[in-house]
Image (cartoon, helix red, strand yellow):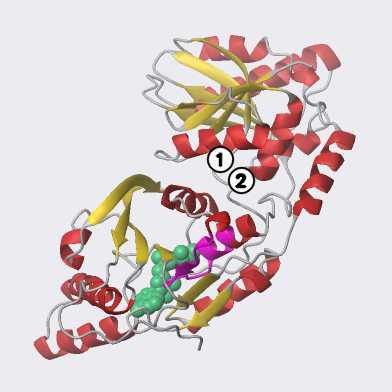
């Protein structure tokens, strides 16, 4: 059985978690973490398994060739020498995607054009016919990655990026990518087997809780979508059917307690509909409510995992937002400083609410704000660097211990409303 050189790109900071995931999916120890991705040599079966089961990879690329380059003519020659006719036919559509890191070339568009010409010319010379380009919905995507001196050509077996699981139709203003939600879960160490409840008190459209619930129900993230490899000549329909059937029969009912709430009832509605489409409506409990007032959904210990409102994209709502707006109006201060103050006020109140009522819980917060522990007057016991798109964040862990709040504390009790 021949082996393919695979590269699975991922967000910076996720490489180690992805390498572990790839080893678990393929059952092979060969995966190695590199800058922004994981590499391995594996048979075609692994291509299908990784596309179907990876929660952390952005896509699965098959690397075809790499060579030093100095200009666009070298890229043309490299692309022209590849046996594209083994991968697709001239009746299919294609597109070239270029990524670059320190490339000296002036125009990446021109580089893409030269590779496109080389692929088309090779087909025309051999088959008298060339495939058309489709920039929006190509059946085949060819990746060109340029570094300072090397060019790498790959074929993309995923198509649409893997964070598109096929269940999200309703999104909020600042939805988290599914791959980042999965990275937060991996970094927190939460697993359904450990038996701890998981709670996102700012759940928005539900990404964190839906990912967690799918893990608990053993629902493969790609079960609801199609992949580019299904259009390639290498596609093995029978093997793919077996892999999908195995994944479908692994689905189980979850007993892991998973909760989400959000101050916006519109968001809770979105989260419910998304959970329904993701097949986990029965595995998550979603409610409305202000994070500054909601009591724990169950007895401790438990894990809170959230990307709260921050910065310019979204501002705190609920009690803290309201109090700050009133104060800003009274003081007639500008809108911008009202928002910045509102955010600090929100986190201060959140910390004091947790200190009072969430003793025994771990709280993991994704935030771009390095000063957040100081603002919350809490000590971060872990800081995991993760990128939310281009924004460098930290996933901060805070341990809520009994007696950390000043003043008398009411007993912790579950709130099932
Ligand atoms: C950055 S978004 C979270 C996005 C979410 N992870 C998702 O996947 O859609 C922050 C969320 O916090 C919610 N929020 C703002 N203030 C809140 C409060 N006081 N209590 C609870 N939720 C709040 C917003 O409605 C928004 O949905």
Q: Which image quarter holds the N terminus?
A: top right
- Relative vertical location of residue 222 with respect to residue 14 in this rendering, above or below: below
User: Residue at 67% of width from left, 59% of height from top?
Assistant: 217
> Residue 409 is drawn in which quadrant?
bottom left
Write the start and end of the magenta stretch as one range: 195-212
Ligand 1 quarter of the rendering: bottom left
The residue that label 2 is drawn on is 162
Q: Is residue 390 visible?
A: no
Disc 2 is placed on an element classified as loop
Give the SS element for disc 1: loop
Q: Is residue 83 above or below residue 102?
A: above
Q: Mark on residue 57?
A: 1
Residue at 51% x, 86% y: name it: 416
Is 326 positioned to the left or the right of 299 in the image?
left
- Which residue is farthest right? 238
On screen, residue 385 versus residue 123, left or right, reads: left
Query: Upstream in the sequence, badge 2 or badge 1?
Result: 1
Percent x, y of residue 327 = 16, 87
Q: Horizontally, is 67 left or right of 228 in the view?
A: left
Mark 1 is surrounded, within 10 Å at the Cα level, by few (under 14), some (14 to 19) or many (20 or more) other residues, namely many
């Amino acid at each position: 059985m021949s082996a393919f050189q695979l590269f699975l790109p991922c967000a910076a900071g996720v490489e180690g978690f992805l390498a572990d995931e790839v080893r678990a999916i393929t059952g092979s120890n060969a995966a190695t973490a590199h800058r922004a991705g994981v590499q391995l040599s594996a048979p075609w079966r692994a291509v299908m398994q990784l596309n179907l089961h990876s929660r952390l990879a952005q896509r699965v690329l098959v690397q075809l060739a790499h060579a030093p380059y100095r200009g666009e003519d070298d890229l043309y020659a490299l692309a022209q020498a590849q046996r594209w006719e083994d991968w697709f036919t001239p009746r299919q559509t294609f597109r070239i995607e270029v990524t670059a890191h320190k490339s000296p070339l002036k125009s990446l568009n021109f580089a893409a054009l030269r590779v496109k010409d080389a692929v088309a010319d090779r087909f025309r010379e051999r088959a008298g016919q060339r495939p058309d380009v489709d920039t929006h919905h190509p059946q085949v995507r060819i990746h060109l990655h340029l570094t300072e001196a090397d060019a790498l050509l790959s074929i993309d077996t995923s198509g649409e990026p893997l964070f598109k699981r096929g269940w999200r139709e309703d999104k909020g203003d600042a939805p988290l990518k599914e791959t980042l939600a999965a990275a937060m879960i991996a970094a927190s160490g939460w697993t359904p087997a450990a038996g701890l409840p998981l709670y996102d008190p700012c759940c928005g459209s539900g990404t964190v809780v839906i990912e967690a619930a799918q893990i608990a129900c053993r629902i493969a993230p790609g079960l609801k979508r199609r992949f580019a490899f299904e259009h390639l000549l290498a596609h093995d329909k029978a093997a793919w059917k077996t892999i999908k059937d195995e994944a479908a029969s692994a689905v189980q009912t979850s007993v892991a307690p998973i909760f989400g709430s959000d101050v916006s009832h519109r968001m809770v509605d979105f989260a419910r509909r998304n959970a329904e489409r993701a097949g986990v409506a029965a595995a998550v409990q979603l409610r409305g409510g202000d994070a500054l007032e909601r009591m724990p959904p169950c007895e401790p210990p438990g894990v809170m995992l959230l990307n709260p409102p921050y910065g310019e994209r979204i501002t705190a709502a609920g009690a803290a937002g309201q109090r700050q707006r009133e104060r800003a109006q009274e003081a007639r201060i500008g809108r911008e400083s009202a928002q910045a103050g509102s955010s600090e006020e929100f986190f201060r109140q959140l910390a004091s609410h947790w200190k009072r009522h969430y003793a025994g819980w771990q709280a993991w917060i994704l935030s771009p704000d390095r000063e957040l522990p100081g603002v919350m007057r809490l000590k971060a016991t872990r800081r995991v660097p993760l990128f939310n798109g281009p924004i460098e964040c930290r996933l901060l862990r805070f341990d809520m211990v009994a007696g950390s709040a000043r003043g008398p504390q009411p007993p912790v009790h579950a709130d099932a409303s």
